[in-house]
Amino acid sequence: MAVAFSLRGSSLLRAVFVRVGLRGFFGVMVSMQMMPVGRMGMVRGLFMVAAAVVLGRLAVVTGSVFVVFGSFAVVFSAFLAHRLWRG
């Protein structure tokens, strides 16, 4: 009996994960309230704020990547200069 349970354990686990995930999703959907069409302007404004934050962070990450590559170039050139001077 333990062998039969272990053979179908992965499918049982998968079924439990799917059921728990769907129960959570439908639980959230049922508990949501309807929003009047006139209030959608506030949602659009919040999306604009979120977009501004994401773009600002993207600029910071891009700048950090350039700093890392610039530092790598300095270290690599110092390594090559050291190898050339050594002979």
Image (cartoon, helix red, strand yellow):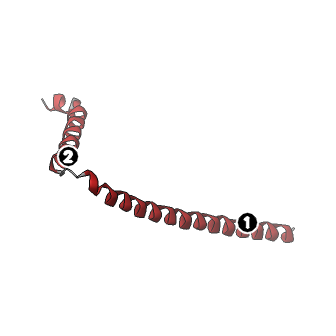
Residue 69: % across, % down: 66, 64
Near mark 1 (Cα within 10 A), the count class, few <14, some 14-19 or many ≥20, is few
Name the residue at the front extreme.
38
| Residue underneath mark 2 | 29
Residue 60: % across, % down: 54, 67
User: Residue visible at 64% across and 65% down?
Assistant: 66
Q: Quadrant of the N terminus?
A: top left
> Depth check: 46 or 73 in front?
46
User: Residue visible at 17% across and 43% down?
Assistant: 23
Residue 21: % across, % down: 23, 43
Please, what secondary structure does the residue beneath circle 2 have? helix
C-alpha distance separating marks 2 and 1: 55 Å
Q: Are marks 2 and 1 in contact (CB under 8 Å)?
A: no
Q: Quadrant of the C terminus?
A: bottom right
> Depth check: 52 or 86 in front?
52
* Quadrant in the picture for residue 12: top left
User: Residue visible at 52% across and 62% down?
Assistant: 58
> Depth check: 75 or 36 in front?
36
